[in-house]
Amino acid sequence: ATTGSAPNFYGNATTKTISVEAPYYTYDESGNEFVAHNTGSALTLYPFMAAIKASSATSDNIDGPSPVVYHKVNALTTDREYLIVTTDDEGNYYSFNANKLSTKYQTKIDATPISVNEGQATRYNETEGLYCELSSGKAKLESLLNGKYLIVNDKGFVVGSSSDFTITPDATNETFKLKSKNNYYIYFNKNTKQFKYTKSTNLASYETADFKLLEREPIAYINVVAPEGYTTFYCKDKYIWPEGIEQFASITGVKDGKIAIEWKPRPDYSQMQAKQALLIKAPQGKYPCYKAWFNGAHEISGNCLFGTEKDKMIEADDNSYFYQLTYGTINGKRTFGFFWAEADGAPFINKGGKAYLKLPKNVANNAQGFALLPTITGIGAVSTDNHAPSAIFTLDGRKLQDKSVEELPAGAYIVNGNKVIVK
């Protein structure tokens, strides 16, 4: 294949080139026999083939061509995503999104043009602007045989085998092997611009191709910096929930003097809708989020967390207080939670990609902050960092000596002239 101008993919990086050699036969006139070539381990690769949309997994009713199904090339780094690109002899580029195997490869039937970053089982012809996709997670292979199926399970692994090929999945990779003794091929048809799987001894119309793997960059990162393990996150796009974060939360209001947090497990929300403001609890680290194409993403309702795409002043609301996830001071000790960033709970400049807490004043009950530490479930009028603490009194006016809020037994107290509930 010749080299043309590479398309402008989001997140282009250093390319890797893998030469793919399909098995083939030649005819030996002296021996009056076919001789097999390329029959060794070079056949281990992930297939790029033409899929035909069928009405069911076993039906031969063909509604029309829909190229191509693909699977990830063997032995790539499993925690990254790749765009797989090839050229034809006219210099046209053809690209394939190859995402992590934790995602099911299933897309829409119609070939509607979309952003190249949004397809997961998608073939894109840059010259013609075409997208062709497979149906219901099952792709029938276009061949000179009767047709075989690749079946994708809910974890994205290909399963099954046939008399023509074997597929071996494991935790990180899959291996697709053609059985060369039966003379099978994966080839690129320069006329139809498709990869195909076939059985034939006519090699004149077949050719192999080089595949270039362009590493994709995430659209956002969830950064957990605080040792307490809390952060907030907001993304303007749909995304696949990153591995390593097993739960997240929304905040629905205030109950019994503390913020009401609803924790949700990752397995139930692995596909997240755009513009969701979330509270995250995870080990310190940097977690990549990849843009997703799906329609069935999860959306959180009744959430008091909101976010902004870029650094932006929060819109004012005279009936609400605004809180930032940060450190506040309780009786001289730092506490992590949601605190006023400005005097009187006024709006502040929210950092892009982060969430803030907005509470109606009648719900917040004049609280300057809410701690996330387990010992303090409700804080009213907490001072922020760099402010000296005041004395602590019981409700009957008795001053408590040498006590911090964290050391208090359950009950109601006066701290900094305001009521504090400790549970």
Image: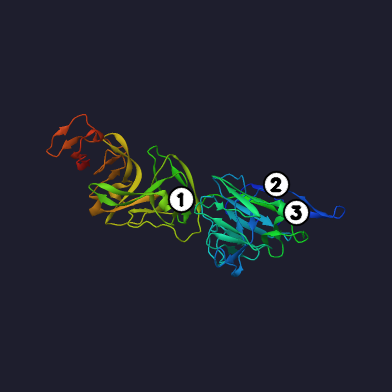
SS for callout 3: strand
SS for callout 1: loop
The type of residue carrying mark 1 is Trp
| Among numbered discs 2 and 3, the one appearing first in the sequence | 3
104 or 350, which is in the foreground? 104
Label for residue 102?
Answer: none
Is the residue marked by circle 1 packed among few (<14), some (14-19), or many (20+) residues within 10 Å?
many
Residue 9 appears in the rendering: no
- Name which quarter of the figure residue 370 lies in: top left
Mark 2 and mark 1 residues within 8 Å of each other at the beta carbon? no
Mark 1 and mark 3: Cα distance apart in space: 43 Å
Q: Position of residue 16 (x, y in %)?
A: 66, 47
The type of residue carrying mark 2 is Ala
Mark 1 and mark 3 residues within 8 Å of each other at the beta carbon? no
- Residue at x 68%, y 51% (from the top left corner): 179
Mark 2 and mark 1: Cα distance apart in space: 35 Å
Residue that label 3 marks: 24
- Residue at x 40%, y 55% (from the top left corner): 276
Q: Is residue 374 left or right of residue 247?
A: left
Residue that label 2 marks: 42
Q: Which quarter shows the C terminus? A: top left
Residue that label 1 marks: 241
Q: Position of residue 158 (x, y in %)?
A: 56, 53
Q: Nearer the viewer, mark 2 or mark 1?
A: 2
Q: Which quarter shows the N terminus? A: bottom right
Q: Is residue 102 left or right of residue 197?
A: left
